[in-house]
Amino acid sequence: MEQIIQPCVTIIIKIVETMKPKKTINLSFGCGVGICPVWIRKDKPQISNDNLVIRWIIIFTLLSYTMINSTIAQNVANSDSRELVYGESWGKESQANLAAFSAWVNNSLKSGENRTSAEGVVLAKQRRAILSELIKSDPAQAIAVAVPRNIREQLPADVVEQLETMVSGIGDFTVFGTIPRTGGPAVESIQKFVQLNGHTYRAYVYGRRLGETTKHGIPMHGVVIDDAIALHENGLRTLADGETTDPTGPVVDLRTLAEKAAVALPPVRAEMGGTIYGFATPEQMQAAEVRIEAAEAGLGPNPSQTAVSLLQVKPFTPPTPKPNNQPSAWTTGSKNVLIIRVDFSDLSGIPEGGQDTQAYVQNLADTQVSPYYAQSSYGQTALINTVTPRLYRMPQTADYYATNGANSQLVADAETAAAPDYTAANYDRIIVLFSDLSGFANSKITYGGLGDIGGPNVRCNGEFDFRVIAHELGHTYGLYHANLWQVTDGNPISPAGTDQATNAALGFTDNYGDPYDTMGANRNNDQRTDFNPNKKNILGWVTDAQVQTVTTSGTYRISRFDNATGTGTLALKIAKDSVHNYWISIRRKFTDNASMQNGAYIVWAKNQNDVTDLLDMNTPGTNVQDAALNVGEYFTDTAANIAILPLDNGGSAPNEYMDVEVDMGPLTSPIWVDFTYGGSTKLGTFANPYTTTADGVYHVSTGGTVYFKGPASSPAGIKIYKPMKLQASGGVVTIGHGQF
């Protein structure tokens, strides 16, 4: 488009310059965001017919420019393009201490009165305490109530000292995932940090960053109090109206010559990494933001392109969408794993009381962990393990690392200590193995293992076994935890919140609570665990084609996923709401668990990379060992108009399958059923002994009415799995041994 517009604009300017009379020609045209004026100054009473060519050139140029912005607007229309603006809720706060401070500021600036520093400092301190907690509980709201920059600049210095700090730069976003020690204390399951401008902040996130994995060298900005940051989800920050910038700072105008000539308006400005960038339109800036986010979307730590380089590519159109969850170099292929064993001056010797010798660690890694990843990935990844024969002495004491929670330094120091023998850059994953540090007073390292989510590093706090290492390596591949949706009211899908009568929690995610998934706690160190199909789909090991997205009622067949082949449809995916999906699959490795051996394994998963929640379909809140939905058992989500009925199992190990009936749409009553005996004992619509005039007997809401009509009697036995009223019409219908 630029090659078309720029010559046209040049021609316009040249022709108009030849016009001797002076007159202002004022034109208006649609630019995708409203009506944008263009002024071409030349004194001319009118554009005569002799200059008709000028008209067409101008029209062509402006239409071309409009097409560019219309195309960009269309490309970003399907994304959530609304940017959270710093201070957008300023003066509209609902919390008393926040509102009191903004009222004091606004009244002071408006009237010029009551601007005593003492009063402002008191209110600012009260606000600071509230905002500090808000950063942790609701980071988006913390950004929304931030003091606008143009207001901040007018406040006394001692008041400003109590305010939040706005930071921006290019830095690292690190996500840690932990697993508790066997018999050890509870640990924080996920920790997120930002390294920016020489500082490390504990990060609290919202939006797309909730599922983002570790990323190096990305643009970030946010609101800081002490060592905590409410991190904005965007890489670019739109400058506020009236915001002043450092006149000596770097400025890059990204508009083309054609855009500068065609639009007599200032550029749309955004800041990234301390540089101010100018765009021709808001749509172009949003397209650039989409590019930046797409470059960060992979599971590995490095974006596909740097944000700065992405801003140099014209035109500003969003990238072509790629298929979701494709195999990547980070999750497939051979991975060289270096296991560095270390000790300390105040905790010397082989870790775990002498157990974690080179031979022991090498054998466990080669005979348990590596085979697991080969099978779980269906042969798409392999681990090649190297265990250091010697112990490397760390430069700091064990007490230092423990009391400071120096997890990143642990890895860096271990790599440095081993550098004479091993080059860390030659390995895809680094595991640092050390003795248990949880016994030190005020220790912050009490986990069993801690790994980078989407990064290369694992820390093993003494407990080198299958449950810890397979779990933490899962983090490095990019996975979050496998949880249990815990309930207190007997409803397996009870919503999050509190019962108003008892004040008890209704439903909540129980960290590590899925005992069948490797990303759960796996407290029994059971090698039969496996990543569920949602997690394998995120890694690209289960393709999108192997996940049946169900949108209509019908009977669907799913194949076992926890084997070495992974063929066929491995899961059903049903949208519950705008956030959650049901994932239905079958596990068959737990041969001593009748429920999991015969039933359907069902989890909730979100639309982005995040934790999954196992649903206990039999004794919710009591016993997760019978969590599977058994054949012939009917589950209904009335709010989402979803009904699930496992019909039958088939196949033989290791290639078992299950047929599942899914009913979609409003669960209504009554429904007429034409009863026809077909001599089959199967249930549901897959091989049903009756036909239906509507959606089926299983589509009736709990307590609803089914009206049977048909022959006078039938020897068929029909199982009704919900309480409902049966009424014969047009003849007596025999169901089992009873007549109705």
Image (cartoon, rainbow, N blue to C red):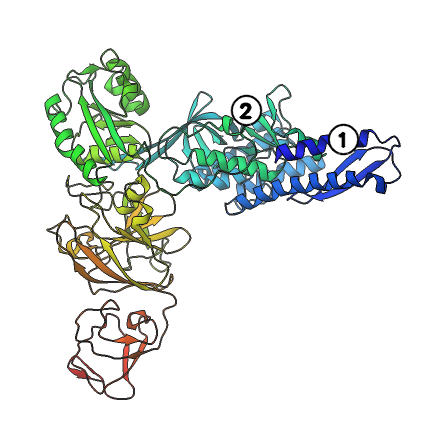
Along the line of sight, which residue is nearer the eye, 429 or 721? 429
Q: Is 561 above or below relative to 256?
A: below
Mark 2 crowd level (few <14, some 14–19, many ≥20, 10 Å Cα) = some
Q: Quadrant of residue 329?
A: top left
Query: Alpha-carbon distance for marks 2 and 1?
Result: 36 Å
Left or right for 326, reference 738: right
The kind of residue tagged 1 is Ile
Label 1 sits on residue? 13
Q: Is residue 179 visible?
A: yes
The image shows residue 275 at horizontal and vertical percentages of 56, 24
Q: Quadrant of the C terminus?
A: bottom left
In the picture, measured across the screen, residue 705 lies left or right of residue 461, that is right
Please state which of residues 131 and 66 is positioned toward the viewer in this rendering: 66
The crowd level at tag 1 (other Cα within 10 Å; few <14, some 14-19, many 20+) is some
Q: Amino acid at mark 2?
A: Gly
> Which residue lies at the image location 19% right of the left edge and 54% below the top edge?
623
Q: Earlier in the sequence, mark 2 or mark 1?
A: 1
Q: Name the residue beneath numbered marker 2.
A: 274
- Report x, y in % for residue 299: 35, 35
Return the residue found at the far top: 420
Q: Secondary structure at mark 1?
A: helix
Up the image or down, 600 lies above or below 671; here it is above
Which quadrant is the N terminus positioned in?
top right
Does the CB distance between marks 2 and 1 fall below 8 Å?
A: no
